[in-house]
Image (cartoon, rainbow, N blue to C red):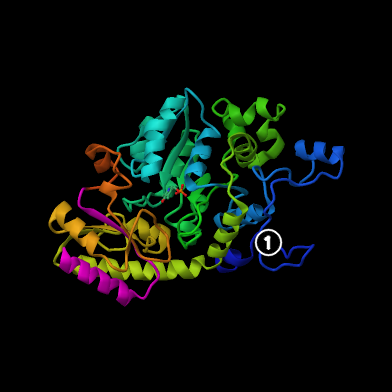
Amino acid sequence: MRDETKLIHSGYETDPTTHAVATPIYQTVAYEFDNAQHGADLFNLAVPGNIYTRIMNPTTDVLEKRVADLEGGVGGLALSAGSAAINYSILNIAEAGSNIVTTPQLYGGTYTLFAHMLPRLGIEVRFAGGDGPDDIAPLIDAQTKAVFSETIGNPAGNIIDIEALAQCAHEHGVPLIVDNTVATPILIKPIEYGADIVVHSLTKYMGGHGNSLGGIIVDGGTFPWADHGERFPMLTTPEASYHGVVYTDALGPAAYIGRARTVPLRNTGSCISPFNAFLILQGIETLSLRMERHCSNAMTVANYLKAHSRVTSVSFAGLPDDPYHGLAQKYCKGVPASLLTFEVDGGYEAAVRFYDALKLFKRLVNIGDAKSLACHPASTTHRQLTSEEQAKAGVTEGMIRLCVGIEHEDDIIEDLTQALAAA
Ligand SMILES: *Cc1c(COP(=O)(O)O)cnc(C)c1O
């Protein structure tokens, strides 16, 4: 099936009991065992089936299969939020004494997890000076468990050369984990370019309507953990918390995603609600249509701002003179979703006047809603960062981030026009 068809059909076959065509919401905590033996077999992973919704749920299962199919992975694990997906993607292979290497342009919450939380657990996070393989390679050593990056940085808008970063990581025996939230699998499929693990905030374009939090980890099934057994003992030696299972022996290419479910999720519980899984599935059905409109509206807005006398700079890889335009052409047909940043002439003061004058654009911290959204990162998402950290993350005091929605483009431009006049 092609993407447009997968978005609607992957992972669901008409319910055999009720013949329901829409994915049913299985709002249940537990599932009854036929008898003691059946319960034992389920716990031994000897037969497929459900035990408890913290670990698995039939509605969530459809979501996991659908996103894994779209990304071209062997399995998915849906979670309560994108943040939980990122946290588990690291905790599944790293422990005290380990390190990971990351590109510097990160979502604000990911930055604080990496800079302040993981180090307290003894996991060092090494921030590279830039997003290329030459920035990353020198930081990898024997304790490195992964290279992490966003395929399209939020809010920086940088696009990584996935192929080059994957090659660099693999040459050093470590997997590449990418956050594909901004691109979605409709624009970029990182596994096709060598990424090993893909994480998403499903809260954004995937759900698409700003009504439900969710996240997912997709395992490409490609990384040869067993060939690097010493580096990845959590996957290649007996797991004490799960009656001594060796994940690479028991699950082969699905070792990583199987452990993510049965160790971090099972024991710390950041599961998604079945109702949120249902709402996100509804959103996903129209993802390709929405992305088309998000992208074309964003191009219109970028060109408009670029030509405006009160705008000093526009950062959007869809523009031909953007430093990342070449990578946008290589990875996403030239248009990198609908996230863009710009500076109003007059710095902080003018940016705030512009921001306060917006009427159609919502002033909030979110992206990927059908509605047009605007954010001032320096006072919100990146507020906890020092100016030096902000600069590294690509954030300036007077920068406005727009996430262009799917309204009529003329209404969007009219709102920007009146707000720029007010600035
Ligand atoms: C929003 C976002 C996250 C965090 O996702 P939540 O669902 O809000 O926890 C992670 N990465 C990126 C790129 C995001 O935009």
At a point 69% along the width and 39% down the height, the residue shown is 251
Bounds of the magenta segment: 397-423
Element on which disc 1 rests? loop
Left or right of 273? Residue 205 is left
**Which quarter of the figure has residue 256?**
top right
Q: Is residue 362 magenta?
A: no
| Observer-nearest of 134 and 196 | 196
At a point 46% along the width and 33% down the height, the residue shown is 172
For the image, the number of numbered tags is 1
| Observer-nearest of 167 and 219 | 219
* Residue 6 image point, x, y percent: 60, 64
Q: Is residue 378 above or below residue 279?
A: above
**Which quarter of the figure has residue 264?**
top right
Q: Badge 1 local density, few (<14 within 10 Å), some, or many (20+)?
A: some
Instruction: Name the residue beneath numbered marker 1.
Output: 24
* Residue 281 image point, x, y percent: 58, 61
Q: Is residue 28 above or below residue 368?
A: above
| Observer-nearest of 386 and 176 | 386
Q: Is residue 354 visible?
A: yes
Left or right of 396? Residue 184 is right
At a point 50% along the width and 52% down the height, the residue shown is 213
Left or right of 231? Residue 1 is right
At a point 26% along the width and 47% down the height, the residue shown is 379
Indicate the amino acid at tag 1: Pro
Say which quadrant the N terminus sits in.
bottom right
Q: Is residue 140 visible?
A: no
Left or right of 324? Residue 99 is right
* Residue 103 image point, x, y percent: 36, 41
* Residue 254 image point, x, y percent: 64, 42
